[in-house]
Image (tube, rainbow, N blue to C red):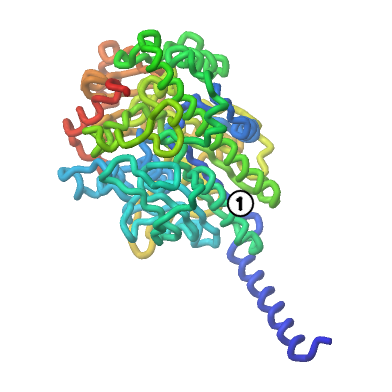
Amino acid sequence: MINKEMKKLFILILAGLAACSQKQNKEVPAQKPNVLVIVADDLGFSDIGTFGGNIQTPVLDKFGKEGMLFSNFHVLPTCSPTRSSLLTGNDNHVAGVGIMSEVSYPAVANLPGYSGQLNNQVVTIPELLREIGYHTYMAGKWHLGDEDGQTPADRGFEESFTLLQGGGSHYADQKPLSPPQVMDYRVNGKRIATLPADFYSTKNYTDTLIHYIDKNKADHKPFFIYASYTAPHDPLQAPKEYIDKYKGKFDMGWDSLRTLRLTNLKALGIVSPDVNAFAPSGIPKWSSLSSAQKAEFAKDMEVYAAMIEYLDMSIGRLLDYLKQQGLYDNTMIVFISDNGANGVMATTYPGNGDGKYLSSFNNALENRGLPNSFIEMGPGWAQASSSPFRLFKSFTSEGGIKAPLMIKLPNDSLNHGQWNRSFVHVTDLMPTILQLAEVSYPAQFKGKAVRQPIGKSLLPVLTGASQEIHSPTEGMGWELFERKAYIKGKWKILRLPAPFSTGQWQLFDLEKDPGEITDLSSQFPATRDSLINDWLQYAKTNDVFDHRGHYDSLLSKSLVGHH
């Protein structure tokens, strides 16, 4: 028997739940879509199967058939600048990340565009979506500020498990990329000292995101998820059973792989049949290497491939969970890489120049990719993953700033693997997400004026209303480490310092020459000069400081001295 007091209590509880439900429905209409943004770290343009790769990525390959694929998507040359533009829709300098914090220097440290951390003149996607009732979750790499007050918990994320720095060991030992850096893990802004003994970054980030969704699924509020993986960033590390899958798969060497990837991209129609691949002179021919060198290099690529296959499997776990919970169809899903493949040597990281720290690892052939090893992809494999584009991460050439992009709209019945070849920029993702969620970017946020996004919503392209959002008369600029570029239509100007180039502005026709091999400056000097003026205007508008010379030799060892 239920007495009168118990009945009264039940009635009050039910009334309260009904009131909460009505309030929730008023704040967040049932049709609000979920958003999942997946970022791979240092993934090459052609590494996944859908983009011509020969690594096993069945989950991403299947996902690519459900949405739209973009073959002309551009990001920033390195991790944190891309993340700042992704989350704010603004140029990385406007967002405060015109420099990576770990390589900052006094001349720019106090400039607003070069703080190395996300500033307050921009607003993030989670800050805006959380205000209208979204859950906002993040797991993985932050790299946008590592001091108290700069964490994801301070920039709109309700729940977060994050590595504040740019990278380091994928295992529980928390060994950093270089001695001056640390690996600072935070849960909702609070530092955690130790990780589970069986920690592996990709696995635990995925577990965390599933936990966050599961914990709050009963309230039926929409969510924004930022799955910011650290794979396949160096040090290259993966479970042994995944590494073993690729034994012997890359014995052909990087020259053959570069040709294979280019052939696959031609077959997909991403590049024209007569395109040649860029081949930097600083990379030795595979045939010139000793048997021992070939064995080590091949093993490194096996570990890299294993990281990507494990990442693909983990993304599958996340997508399967959404399907099991009936959330998949109403979720917009975005997959990108944050920059080109990483050909920069670990010896160039600040503090690693003397080799002492790197020599403390066990990089014997049988231990490469396992705990207490530190290996990298290196320029040979990175250039193959970037084929046919020029160079790789850290450069404003196409190999550094061109990345894969796939997007599935909620209940998408239109795209189903359709390719779009128009110019798209990472700053376009925020306006796309905001338009989908029916949120306007404010003129002010928390009482302060904020800079307006430079990106444009991709929804007209995704819904079939348009083939492009940027006309050939619109341009986009880049600057990082004094490496500069500007793209307008088919034309691109590029300035790279010696020994990578001449140190002067060069002009390329990206339609005919995506590898940026033939400088057309002498044939079209007026075009080059016009684009230089456009870049100067871009620099003025976006808080770019000309720090010529400081970085010209910083990464000059990227193409030499491998192992």
Residue bearing mark 1? 33
In the picture, residue 529 is in which quadrant? top left
Q: Nearer the viewer, residue 42 or 167?
A: 167
Residue drawn at the location 78% of the way across and 91% of the way down: 4
Q: Secondary structure at mark 1?
A: loop
In the picture, residue 419 is in which quadrant? top right
Judge whether residue 542 can be spotted in this image.
no
Q: Is residue 256 above or below residue 298?
A: above
Q: Is residue 179 left or right of residue 211?
A: left
Residue drawn at the location 33% of the way across and 40% of the way down: 177
Give the quarter of the figure containing the N terminus: bottom right
Q: Is residue 82 left or right of residue 3?
A: left
Residue drawn at the location 42% of the way across and 14% of the way down: 277
Residue drawn at the location 51% of the way across and 43% of the way down: 202
Q: Nearer the viewer, residue 112 or 388?
A: 388
- How far across and how far down the image is residue 61, in percent? 61, 30
Q: Nearer the viewer, residue 99 or 529?
A: 99
Q: Is residue 335 left or right of residue 539?
A: right
Q: Residue furthest right?
A: 1
Q: Amino acid at mark 1?
A: Pro
Judge whether residue 83 can be spotted in this image.
yes
Q: Is residue 291 above or below residue 330?
A: above
- How far across and how far down the image is residue 484, in percent? 28, 30
Q: Is residue 181 above or below residue 497?
A: below
Q: Residue furthest bottom?
A: 4
Graded by Cα atoms within 10 Å as few (under 14), some (14 to 19) or many (20 or more), the crowding at tag 1 reads many
